[in-house]
Image: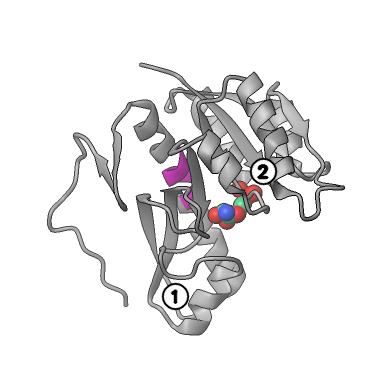
């Protein structure tokens, strides 16, 4: 099995990063974290990486206001030096520019805590609750130039419960995020993903034709 070299971009607590690290260590994910990069010096995600002996790099965004392309050029340099094949955005709170997207064309993944294309952007669990949807969930997708618009690889559906708060819903969604992000990376590592326009074909997938969910 081929091992894919990952570069993770993070800004905060890094629970998705942790799930990826754990799955690499327990042998269910054929990947290697070549580098974890944060725009925030105090991101707990960097700490998590260091605890596992992984390269953790802070690239400050100070002085790059209005110069996003220049900041992304630093990211590209670091990722390329480390021989990164696949970039995983894992709670990276910056909008990335076409420069980075071009440098890693169809090789950048993102995890989003809603069922895209519903609820793109920020504070999406709150938005889902306010809208009154019966299901939300999470999505792993390839990154394109839009905001949370790229071709979808995997989604997990999470029912919304009567007494849900933003916190309780976020926690249940996060549990699924931790599963599907590694799963999507594994599919990539196995060479099973083909992008056709907006669609991502998964070769030799095990799918049940009559799968469905009803809530309540
Ligand atoms: C997750 O909810 C992810 O979907 C979103 O940002 C959050 C990051 O959480 N993109 P963590 O840093 O992985 O714990």
Quadrant containing the C terminus in the rendered view: bottom left
Can the viewer see residue 89? no
Rendered location of residue 144, percent (x, y) = 47, 50
Compared across the picture, whether 139 is left or right of 100 comes to left
| 94 shown above or below 17 | below
Rendered location of residue 210, percent (x, y) = 13, 58
Which residue occupies 43% across, 23% down? 30
Give the residue number, with chain letter if any, for mark 2: 10
Q: Which quadrant would residue 99 be assigned to in this image?
A: top right
Quadrant containing the N terminus in the rendered view: top left
Q: Nearer the viewer, residue 157 or 5?
A: 5
Where disc 2 sits, the SS reads: strand
The answer to whether the residues at label 2 and label 1 have Cβ atoms under 8 Å apart is no
Rendered location of residue 111, percent (x, y) = 50, 50
Q: Main secondary structure of the magenta part?
A: helix
Q: Which quadrant would residue 103 be assigned to in this image?
A: top right
| Numbered label attached to residue 81 | none
Density class for disc 2 (Cα within 10 Å; few <14, some 14-19, many ≥20) is many
Which residue occupies 42% across, 49% down? 141
Compared across the picture, whether 140 is left or right of 58 comes to left
| Numbered label attached to residue 161 | 1
Which region of the structure is painted magenta? 177-182
């Amino acid at each position: 099995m081929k091992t894919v070299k990952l570069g993770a971009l993070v800004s905060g607590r890094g629970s998705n990063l942790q799930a990826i690290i754990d799955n690499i260590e327990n042998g269910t994910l054929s990947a290697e974290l070549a580098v974890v990069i944060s725009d925030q010096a105090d991101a707990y995600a960097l700490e998590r990486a260091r605890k596992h002996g992984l390269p953790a790099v802070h690239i400050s965004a100070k002085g790059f206001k209005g110069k996003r392309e220049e900041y992304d050029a630093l990211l590209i340099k670091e990722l390329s030096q480390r021989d990164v094949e696949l970039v995983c955005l894992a709670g990276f709170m910056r909008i990335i520019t076409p420069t980075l997207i071009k440098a890693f064309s169809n090789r950048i993944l993102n995890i989003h805590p809603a069922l895209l294309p519903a609820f793109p952007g920020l504070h999406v669990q709150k938005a889902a609750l306010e809208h009154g949807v019966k299901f939300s969930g999470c999505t792993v997708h390839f990154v394109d130039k839009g905001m949370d618009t790229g071709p979808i690889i995997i989604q997990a559906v999470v029912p919304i419960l009567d007494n849900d708060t933003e916190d309780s819903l976020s926690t249940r969604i996060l549990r699924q995020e931790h599963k599907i992000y590694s799963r999507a990376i594994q599919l990539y590592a196995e060479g099973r993903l083909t992008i056709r326009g907006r669609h991502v074909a998964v070769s030799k997938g095990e799918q049940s034709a009559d799968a469905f969910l009803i809530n309540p």
